[in-house]
Image: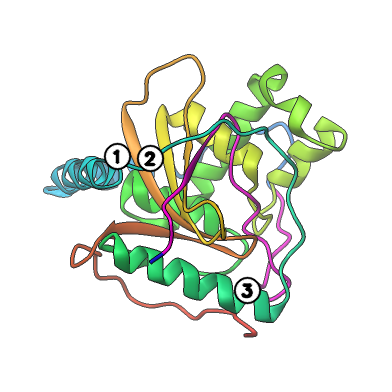
Amino acid sequence: METSGGEKYGIAGRASATSSLSTSSSLYSSGDDSTEDDPAIAAALAEDGNSANINNTYGQQHRLGRRLSHLDSIPHTPRVNNEIPDANDATFDHERLSERLSTYGLAELQIEGDGNCQFRALADQLFRNPDYHKHVRKQVVKQLKRFKRLYEGYVPMRYKDYLKKMKKLGEWGDHVTLQAAADRFGAKICLVTSFRDTCYIEILPKDKNPSREIWLSFWSEVHYNSLYETGEVPTRVPKKRFWLF
């Protein structure tokens, strides 16, 4: 069995990126902070039983937190994304992640690998629906734009260009967008990773106590999925995946 270890990030995670995932390049109009899918989300949350389902999800998230509360966190300096692993390394990483999930009694809701996986996984944890990824992306970009001083030091390019890039559907999320999501939604984002030396990462919101937990698996540099307790993964219609290995 592997040795448990953890890291607590101020800004954490890596890009859910691989050349084996298909991406799209449609772009939201620059400067538009509107969220046209907000009414749809509000309507969905108003449906009978849906709010109860989301509250139940929050309860499950706290149970997951208690289950992994013994993992230590160590300081970590934010860093830019690493290179995408080759097919062999990615396969070994996936096997390591699968073993860890099994050890801790966790199961993945498989998220579509279309370049939006980080935002889809966040949407599933927040709204129990990965299809609200556009809304999550827009809220993250709004956070990045409004509080530039908090994030620009971690962006190795012109910040304006970075914002423009992150507005695009299919653009991979990274360590900066995860921190912005934690800040925007007041959530502690908990990653169970495939890293050899670090199996657990926490991303905490700045300047506030988290009001919820978000649980994701992170197949390093490749993909994010949404995590549940084994046996509690909601049933969804499977979608086509785009792996080349």
Q: Which residue is mark 3?
A: 90
Is there CB contact under 8 Å for labels 3 and 1?
no
- Answer with left or right where residue 52 lies relative to residue 205: left
Residue 158 in picture, x, y percent from top left: 87, 33
Image vertical order of residue 186 relative to residue 94, above or below: above
Q: Amino acid at mark 2?
A: Pro
User: How far is the residue under mark 2 from the one under mark 3?
Assistant: 39 Å
Crowding at mark 3 (Cα within 10 Å: few <14, some 14-19, many 20+): some
Q: Which residue is mark 2?
A: 39
**Kind of element beneath mark 1:** loop
Image vertical order of residue 188 relative to residue 220, above or below: above
Instruction: Answer whether residue 118 is magenta in the image.
Output: no
User: How far is the residue under mark 1 from the one under mark 2?
Assistant: 37 Å
| Magenta residue span | 2-27
Residue nearest the viewer, comparing 128 with 67: 67
Image vertical order of residue 226 relative to residue 138, above or below: below
Residue 3 in picture, x, y percent from top left: 43, 56
- Answer with left or right where residue 136 lies relative to residue 166: left
Q: Amino acid at mark 1?
A: Ser
